[in-house]
Image: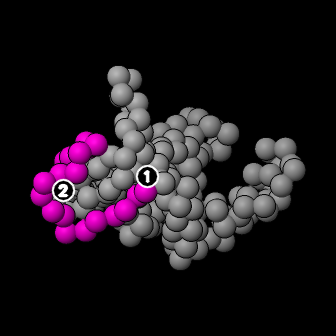
C-alpha cells in the first residue's frame, strides 16, 4: 500500500453508511484500495494521522475562468456589458502566456486549498492552462472560450484560430495523465 490515512471521519457518499468514524483509507497508485474501520494488516510506505479530520470526496467546480483570478476585485459594481467591454476585455487583450499561466496556477492553488480537485475551465490560451493544470495536479476539463462578435454569416469554423488550437490541444492534452486533463467543446454566451 502506498498511503494509509488513519483514524479519519470518512464521508462515504453511501446512503447505507454515510459516515465512518475512526476509519482507515488505503491508497495504491493514486486510487482508493482499502476502506474500513479496521486497521489493515499490511503496512504502507506513508502514514497520515487524520485524527479529528474529515476525509471526503473532492469538490468539483463546474464553471471557472482560473486566469481571471488576477482580476479579482477589478472593476466591481458594473453591469455585465460595461464590466466586460470597458474593463475586462481591455485587460485581457494585454495578457500574455506568462500572465495567463500565473493566474491559472494561482486560481488552481486556491481551488485545491478549498478542497476542489476538479475544474471545468473555459478561457483562451488553453495550452498554457493545460500546462498549469499538469503542474498543479488538478483534474481539468478545458475548453477554449471562442467568441465572435461579427455577423453570424461571416464566421467560419474551419478557419477560426480557436478551431486550430483545439485540434492541437486534442492531440497533445486530451486524456493526459490517465484522463486527468480532458478537452471539451463548450458554448460561450455573452
According to the picture, the residue beneath numbered tag 2 turns out to be 28
**Which of these two is toward me, 65 or 92?**
65
Marks 2 and 1, how far apart in space? 18 Å
Q: Left or right? Give the position of 153 relative to 120.
A: right
Q: Is residue 186 above or below residue 172?
A: above
* Residue 21 in the image, given as x and y percentages of width and height: 39, 42
* Residue at the (66%, 71%) spot, across then down: 94
Say above or below: 96 vs 43. Answer: below
Name the residue furthest bottom. 98
Picture coordinates of residue 43 (x, y %)? 15, 62
- Tell me the element at label 2: strand
Total numbered circles: 2
Which quarter shows the C terminus? top right
Which residue is nearer to you in this view: 182 or 21? 21
Front label number (2 vs 1): 2
Residue under pointer 1: 117
**Residue drawn at (56%, 49%) of the image:** 64
Which picture quadrant has residue 3? bottom left
Question: Which span is picked out in magenta?
Answer: 32-51
Amino acid at each position: 500500500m502506498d498511503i494509509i490515512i488513519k483514524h479519519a471521519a470518512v464521508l462515504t457518499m453511501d446512503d447505507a453508511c454515510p459516515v465512518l468514524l475512526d476509519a482507515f483509507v488505503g491508497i495504491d497508485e493514486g486510487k482508493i484500495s482499502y476502506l474500513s474501520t479496521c486497521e489493515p494488516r499490511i503496512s504502507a510506505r506513508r502514514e497520515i494521522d487524520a485524527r479529528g479530520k474529515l476525509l471526503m470526496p473532492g469538490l468539483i467546480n463546474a464553471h471557472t475562468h482560473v486566469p481571471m483570478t488576477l482580476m479579482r476585485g477589478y472593476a466591481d459594481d458594473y453591469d455585465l456589458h460595461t464590466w466586460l467591454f470597458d474593463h475586462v476585455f481591455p485587460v485581457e487583450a494585454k495578457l500574455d502566456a506568462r500572465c495567463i499561466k500565473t493566474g491559472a496556477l494561482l486560481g488552481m492553488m486556491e481551488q485545491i486549498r478549498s478542497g476542489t480537485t476538479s475544474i471545468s475551465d473555459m478561457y483562451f490560451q488553453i495550452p498554457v492552462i493545460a500546462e498549469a493544470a499538469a503542474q498543479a495536479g488538478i483534474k481539468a476539463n478545458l475548453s477554449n472560450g471562442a467568441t465572435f462578435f461579427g455577423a453570424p454569416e461571416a464566421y467560419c469554423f474551419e478557419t477560426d484560430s480557436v478551431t486550430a488550437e483545439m485540434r492541437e490541444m486534442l492531440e497533445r492534452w486530451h486524456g493526459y495523465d490517465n484522463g486527468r486533463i480532458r478537452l471539451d467543446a463548450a458554448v460561450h454566451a455573452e
